[in-house]
Image (cartoon, rainbow, N blue to C red):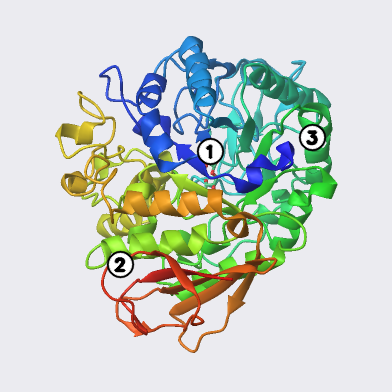
Amino acid sequence: RDPHSWWRTSVVYQIYPRSFADSNGDGVGDLRGIIEHLDHLVDLGIDVVWLSPIYASPHADNGYDISDYRAIDPVFGTLDDFDELVEALHLRGMRLVMDLVVNHTSDEHPWFVESASGPDSPKRDWYWWRPPRAGRIGGSPGAEPNNWGSFFSGPAWTYDEASGEYYLHLFARKQPDLNWENREVRAAVHDVMRWWIDRGVDGFRMDVINLISKHPDLPDGPVRSGGAYGDGFPHYNCGPRLHEFLQEMHEHVLEGHPSHLLTIGEMPGVTIDQARLATDPARRELDMVFQFEHVSLDHGPTGKWEPTRTSIDRVFDTLVEWQEGLAAAGWNGLYWNNHDQPRVVSRFGNDREHWHASATALATVLHMQRGTPFVYQGEELGMTNMPFSDMAELRDIESLNHIAEAVARGAELDGVLAAIRWSGRDNARTPMQWTHGPHAGFTTAEPWIGVNPNHDRINAHDQRGVPGSVFEHYRALIALRRTDRVVSDGTFARLTTTDPLVVAFERRLGDESLLVVANLSDVPRHAVEAPADAVLVLRNVLGPVTNLLAPWEARVHRIR
Ligand code: ISL
């Protein structure tokens, strides 16, 4: 096979280092903790590890605010630890993908410090500085250069007294946006990428890369009734020069590498058409993107803090649209979870009565699709959302800012907390559950965020090598992708069913095919019949195979 398309048969495991494993007893996960647990990834059959940011950072947003792109934050270890990790992964046949966070830096990055030193700074133009709105006094309410809100509450602008100007930050005020219009900025990013490639990394997951090209006029966005800010999204999502910037990066940094550097663009809000443009190999931009449609269906009209129930068949419909939309050109990044999303078994499954079956059914439906599956740490154990009961247990800046803003607006704290329990990012960030012992075996100290009390029944120790466990089901799914080319290369076709909660699809390559059938509900339902000569290759529940599917039963049949 073509050595350049290794990524088409790979499964990626995302590590959120802060919450994975603490080796030095300070309550925070670190690089040596990862090195000590590589056997877990080997057992699972992982090909690629994606590390959330480990660079020097003030940690306003847990490392997505970088103050030095060429240094490891001491809380995670040293460059020596990093080199050792790369070597250890490569030795085991795994690759490493780094998080590239270059839509913004930390406000403590020397580039921004220099830029903020005054309007004459040679780096002034590296960020988006603008005077107050005409006729307004800087720093007064409504004087911001435009009406955009930040993703993390409040306006997208912060006033700088010294220069009398504002700087743009689509995220927290400690995350100023880089100005990609400036070619020096792009060259500096390319340099950072080359530096890590020279150190042996195998690719990049690019944070909110669809936001790097802003409409240079920064126009106001529409304000929804009752809303405090305008929606700037149309002016910076997949902006005018996005594809040019991605092609330039490809040409200057990625092309000509002896193997193939894996690139994954995180693109909240991206449409199928935009994703196809970004991932069509002929256009030389990215290998795949993370889209967000299927994880936005339970957001209400004002977003994630107004969660609504969605039905799982809508979620599946959406994934099918992406399968079909990227079938001819482009490639899907497949995921249920990451460090920003609530846990899938709690969100779309049933983490009470059907915890095991729903976790494994959802895994089956995702992993049998065409694309590259991502497993987020703990997902392979069926880790669940956290029963946060008090604000003091939360750590995420997005949630904390939202509470402050909502309460100031007069909202009841209980209602706000209920929404956070459903949608909050800290659900994904509780420590990895290694054992049923103290702190789930994550640390010997007080962990930086509380451990989920259910680690007494959900943990790696009780699942690895135990037939029928969630872990072993993930292992089997990953193994099937390795051994069966129809899983990686086959076409995808949805099969119509009379029952919307029973989903079915076929993967086909030449005259081999797989039939995937799943009951995505809490009650038994009629199965889609497989041909008489079909062989059952994978199933997530025990008991005789009948024409009824048990609650959340999933079956994979091979048909020749
Ligand atoms: O979870 C979200 C907020 O509701 C998402 O919109 C998220 O902010 C978005 O997916 C971008 O995420 C990435 O960039 C952020 C960082 O906080 C996230 O952790 C990261 O994955 C800013 O760097």
Q: Can residue 147 be seen by looking at this rendering? A: no
Label 2 packing within 10 angstroms: few (<14), some (14-19), many (20+): some
Q: Secondary structure at mark 1?
A: loop
The quadrant of the image that shows the N terminus is top right
Query: Image point 29% across, 44% down: which residue?
Result: 465
Q: Which comes before the other along the chain, label 2 or label 3? A: 3
Query: Image point 16% across, 45% down: which residue?
Result: 456
Q: CA distance from mark 2 to mark 3?
A: 45 Å
Whether residue 342 sits left or right of residue 387 in the image: it is right
Three-letter amino acid code at the position of disc 1: Asp
**Residue at numbered disc 2:** 541
Q: Nearer the viewer, residue 425 or 440?
A: 440
Query: What percent of the width, then of the height, locates residue 378?
Result: 35, 44
Q: Nearer the viewer, residue 524 or 391?
A: 524
Which image quarter: residue 436? top left
Q: Which comes before the other along the chain, label 3 or label 1? A: 1
Label 3 packing within 10 angstroms: few (<14), some (14-19), many (20+): some
* Disc 1: residue Cβ within 8 A of ligand 1's nearest atom: no
**Residue at numbered disc 1:** 47
Query: What percent of the width, then of the height, locates residue 55?
Result: 52, 22
Q: How many marks?
A: 3
Callout 1 touching callout 2 (CB < 8 Å) = no
Query: What percent of the width, then of the height, locates residue 559?
Result: 55, 72
The single residue placed furthest to the bottom in the displayed view is 498
Q: CA distance from mark 3 to mark 1?
A: 23 Å
Labels 3, 1: front one: 1
Three-letter amino acid code at the position of disc 3: His
Q: Which mark is residue 399?
A: none
Whether residue 8 sits left or right of residue 93 in the image: it is right
**Residue at numbered disc 3:** 250
